[in-house]
Image (tube, rainbow, N blue to C red):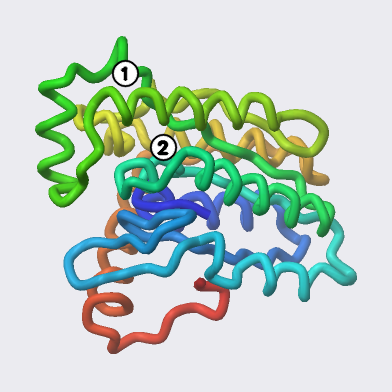
Amino acid sequence: MGASNLARGYSALANCLVRCLAPHPVEILHAMGPGRGYCAEGGIFNITYSPIGSCGILKSASGRVRGVRRVVALITDIGNDIMYDVPVSEITSCLNTLLQNLDAIGADVFVNPIPLDFAEDVSERQFRILKSIFYPHSAVDYSRAAKAVTAVNGFLRDSAGGRIHLLPSAKDFCGVDKIHYSIFRSHKAWSQMAAEMLRVLPVEQAGKIGWLPTLNSLFANMGRLVFCDMIPVRKKSPGTF
């Protein structure tokens, strides 16, 4: 579950997991897309995605777990709701419901904190520029966004434990916009996440992802955006929510 970063890296991550888990059968469900939120509708251009929290992915997953050996979930790209002016209490409540529902089906959950430290990474001027590009209609100011990121990341840290795993910050893999993974470093981010996810699965193989698969994944995402979301001439996969 995620937004733009997951959409860009999805094919590379999914292919890595399938390859490393072979010959075990693997089924992957995903809810993702640029600008997607967990609590609020979001999207880009003429595309609007339903909130991840109410898109039906967990209901579908709960109906598929019988006879499944292991369930692993990834929650990433959490920050969009902040810029959509969703209160922190609503964001954390939505995330808490997701975590509870995933726990109910016995899932190991890997959560990516928001990879931003406003004090170190983003000045108020940079924030205004980024907001005008990615969230031109947002009324959220620098101070409010900074406090919200701190609060949401604090909630994620407090929630970690047991089958809920807090992933290392991916801030070192982000590009100049501080939001999206750099095209030259994204393979390292996804390799790190794949390795962490595979630790709980019955394999010994490391989840290393090369630069070329992440580039191919980026092009695959462009194809989905154009031919599945913008101009729906191609059917989405059955695991798409």
Classify 10 Å Cα crowding around label 1: few (below 14), some (14-19), many (20 and above). Answer: some
Between disc 1 and disc 2, the foreground one is 1
Determine the residue located farthest toward the right in the rendered image: 67
- Residue 211 is drawn in which quadrant? top left
Determine the residue located farthest toward the top in the rendered image: 120
Label ID, residue 221:
none
Q: Is residue 191 left or right of residue 35?
A: right
Q: Give coordinates of residue 179: x percent, y percent.
A: 30, 35
153 w.r.t. 94: above or below: above
133 w.r.t. 120: above or below: below
- How far apart in space, not on screen, are marks 1 and 2 (Cα)? 25 Å
Q: Residue at x 30, y 43 (%)?
A: 83
Q: Which residue is drawn at 60% across and 31% down?
A: 156
Q: Give coordinates of residue 112: x percent, y percent.
A: 53, 35
Label ID, residue 187:
2
93 w.r.t. 225: above or below: above
Q: In this view, does 99 lie to the left or right of 235?
A: right
Q: Nearer the viewer, residue 124 or 202?
A: 124
Q: What element carries label 2?
A: helix
Q: Which of 159 and 72 is in front in this view?
A: 159
- Give the residue pinned by disc 1: 118
Q: What element carries label 1?
A: helix
Mark 1 and mark 2 lie on one chain; the one further toward the N terminus is 1
